Amino acid sequence: MNSDAVLRPIIEARKVGKRFGAFHALKDVSATFYEGQVTAIVGPSGSGKSTFLRTLNRLETHDSGDIVVDGTVLNDNLKNLDTIRREVGMVFQSFNLFSHLTILRNVALAPMRVRKMTRAAAEAKAMNLLERVGLKSQAAKYPVQLSGGQQQRVAIARALAMDPKVLLFDEPTSALDPEMVNEVLAVMRELAYSGITMLVVTHEMGFAREVADRIIFFDEGVILEDTTPESFFAHPDHERAKAFLSQVRHGF
């Protein structure tokens, strides 16, 4: 984390609530995330962690509370939403690549369409990003020709192509075969050390412990722990967190 930048809030969530019918997915969740910070969001399945992440760029609408991203209020205002989505990159469980486009075009498309870059400039940038994620040699291939791990690395490069202020990762390794997980985590590790602001919903406890500046533990729609990795893994405050760690302890 860039210690010179941590005082500047980049995302502020204030008493955010979300329901799916009778199910109360998020219950007055408040958290502030700072520029240059890497936050790992962990917790059992169904605890609200992915729902919370998805509210931060309005893939899920929040029912109550406020979300502010780099000074812009996230609401139904399409101009605000467009501003935020230009600045917040997202990497999903599934790779969501365009099957009919080459890897190079997948990465270059958004800068051309949204940032209005020329094709030559966007493709030059895309090649640099593919080199960064170790896939420059695959630029002319199509997604179906790549492994799951390679496709996820392309998805990361595609998110980076927009020069986002924040990168959101929603369990980016959960759909991968075990042997492919490390290649994706290696790219994410490099990004974290480069100073990019990252919020990562993950089950990879070893990665969270090593790379994150901060651990947020969700359970039943609330944040039970918001602390350093050292504190969370060594002596969590809540029994629910202790039980969760005892179940996943073999993973790190």
Image (cartoon, rainbow, N blue to C red):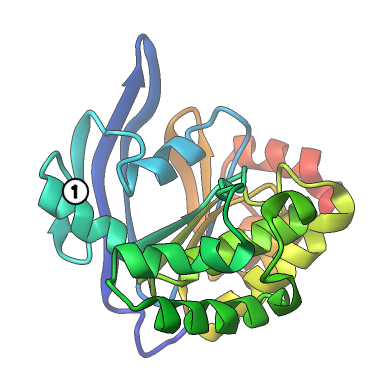
Asked whether 172 or 218 is in front, the reply is 172
Task: Tally the marks.
Answer: 1
Residue 165 sits in quarter = bottom left
**Residue that numbered label 1 is attached to:** 74
Residue situated in front as seen by the camera: 245 or 71: 71
On the image, the x and y values in percent for residue 85 come to: 30, 56
- Snapshot quadrant of residue 72: bottom left
Residue 16 seen in render? yes
**Residue 116: quarter of image:** bottom left
Check disc 1 and report its element: helix, strand or loop.
loop
Q: Which residue is drawn at 14% across and 46% down?
A: 78
Q: In this view, does 102 lie to the left or right of 119?
A: right
Residue at (53, 65) in percent of width and height = 105
Q: Where is residue 79 in the image (x, y as percent from the top left)?
A: 12, 52
Residue at (57% x, 41% y) in the render: 238
Percent position of residue 134, x then y: 73, 77
Q: What residue type is labelled 1?
A: Leu
Identify the residue at horizontal 61%, vertical 61% (top origin): 102
Q: Quadrant of the C terminus?
A: bottom right
Q: Nearer the viewer, residue 40 or 82?
A: 82
Whether residue 228 is visible to the viewer of this picture, yes or no, is no
Is 143 situated above or below 163? above
Q: Is 134 placed above or below 148 here? A: below
Residue 240 percent coordinates (x, y): 61, 35
Residue at the bottom extreme of this rendering? 4
Tell me: 100 left or right of 80: right
Q: How crowded is mark 1: few (under 14 residues within 10 Å), some or many (20 or more)?
A: many
